[in-house]
Amino acid sequence: MTVDAVHVASGKVREIYALGEDTLALVASDRISTFDVVLATQIPDKGRVLTGLSAFWFARTREIVPNHLLEIREDGRTMVCQRLEMLPIECVVRGYLAGSGWSDYRRTGSVCGHGLPAGLEESARLPEPIFTPATKATEGHDLNIDEEEAERLCGTERFLTAKQASLALYRFASAHAEARGIILADTKFELGVDPEGTVVLADEALTPDSSRFWPADSYQPGRPQPSFDKQYVRDWCEATGWDKASPGPELPDDVVAGTRARYVEAFERLTEIPFADYLARPGVVL
Ligand code: Q0Z
């Protein structure tokens, strides 16, 4: 007897269901989080934009590393995936100095054991992309670790494969994005291992929820950069005087529309596929 769609996990804006022993459904909702709070107001089609983008990248990076995607459902927000044994680290790659990378650099001059040149500014482009693994925190934020610790957690062979795959994926995607006016400042991959022992790219990949996307035309190091997708929401929320405690404010229609337009713009710039075509036939990204 088969039992379908058993809920197995919730993220802030996504759900995972087990479809059987070996397959999962990852469903991306239209929820949005800002300042770590999931807002009551949804952004229509946000889950479809993220699912379509992930699938686009999976289809174009299969020669770099195999991935877990089996099928994209007609709803445009569900990926059917191969169930894997997940590596116990987040595989982060940074090409620019932002977030915890910038904090760690300011404090110590290093990020995850990578000594960096002195005098770098906030949001500076790094001399070359660096692999900056983190542990998966069950609650709160991930903790940056050095490569030695990541290697101990994964085992040497899996660690080295995951690191090389992550750096190669970042190099491919950041060049693609930069040519289309989007800076991929950093990104987080989750990798797993299949029953044959092959390291496989999983989860979502190279979306604005797992990466920092910055508009290239306004890039200016020395300050934080505006987020390509979420800046309208953040600015509007800040202007209300909200104290960043849950629940957040409800978004007005114009902020919802402006935010949806930015997600759709990111999709169309990166994929060169009209988003309406994706809605009509999600398989167009594959
Ligand atoms: C992904 C996550 C989400 C909450 C587990 N192919 C896979 N095999 C085994 N496990 C996973 C995957 Cl993708 C897996 N996550 C992250 C995703 C909601 C947490 F949609 N957790």
Image (tube, rainbow, N blue to C red):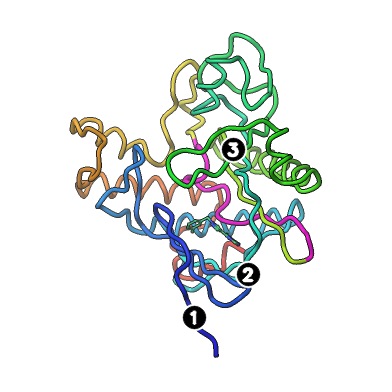
Residue in the picture at 52% in, 72% down: 18
Secondary structure beneath label 1: loop
Location of residue 132 in the rendering, given as x and y in whole percent from the top left corner: 64, 33
Crowding near the residue tagged with mark 3, few <14, some 14–19, many ≥20 C-alpha atoms within 10 Å: many
Residue type of the residue flagged with mark 2:
Leu
Indicate yes or no whether the magenta region holds residue 248. Answer: no
From the viewer's perspective, tell me whether residue 286 is left or right of residue 168: left
**Residue tagged by mark 3?**
134
Cβ at disc 2 under 8 Å from ligand 1: no
Residue in the picture at 25% in, 52% down: 41
Distance from Cα at disc 2 to Cα at disc 1: 17 Å
Q: Earlier in the sequence, mark 2 or mark 1?
A: 1
Q: Are marks 2 and 1 in contact (CB under 8 Å)?
A: no
**Residue tagged by mark 2?**
70
Q: Earlier in the sequence, mark 3 or mark 2?
A: 2
Q: Earlier in the sequence, mark 3 or mark 1?
A: 1
- Residue at the bottom extreme, as displayed: 1
Residue type of the residue flagged with mark 1:
Asp
Pick the residue in front: 145 or 65.
145
Location of residue 160 in the rendering, given as x and y in whole percent from the top left corner: 78, 42
- Residue at the front extreme, as displayed: 152
Distance from Cα at disc 3 to Cα at disc 2: 27 Å
Q: Is residue 147 above or below residue 7?
A: above
Pick the residue in front: 268 or 212.
212
Magenta-highlighted residues: 196-213
Overall secondary structure of the magenta stretch?
A: loop
Distance from Cα at disc 3 to Cα at disc 1: 33 Å
From the viewer's perspective, tell me whether residue 170 is left or right of residue 210: right
Disc marking residue 29: none
Pick the residue in front: 122 or 7.
7
Disc marking residue 4: 1
The label nearer to you, 3 versus 2, is 3
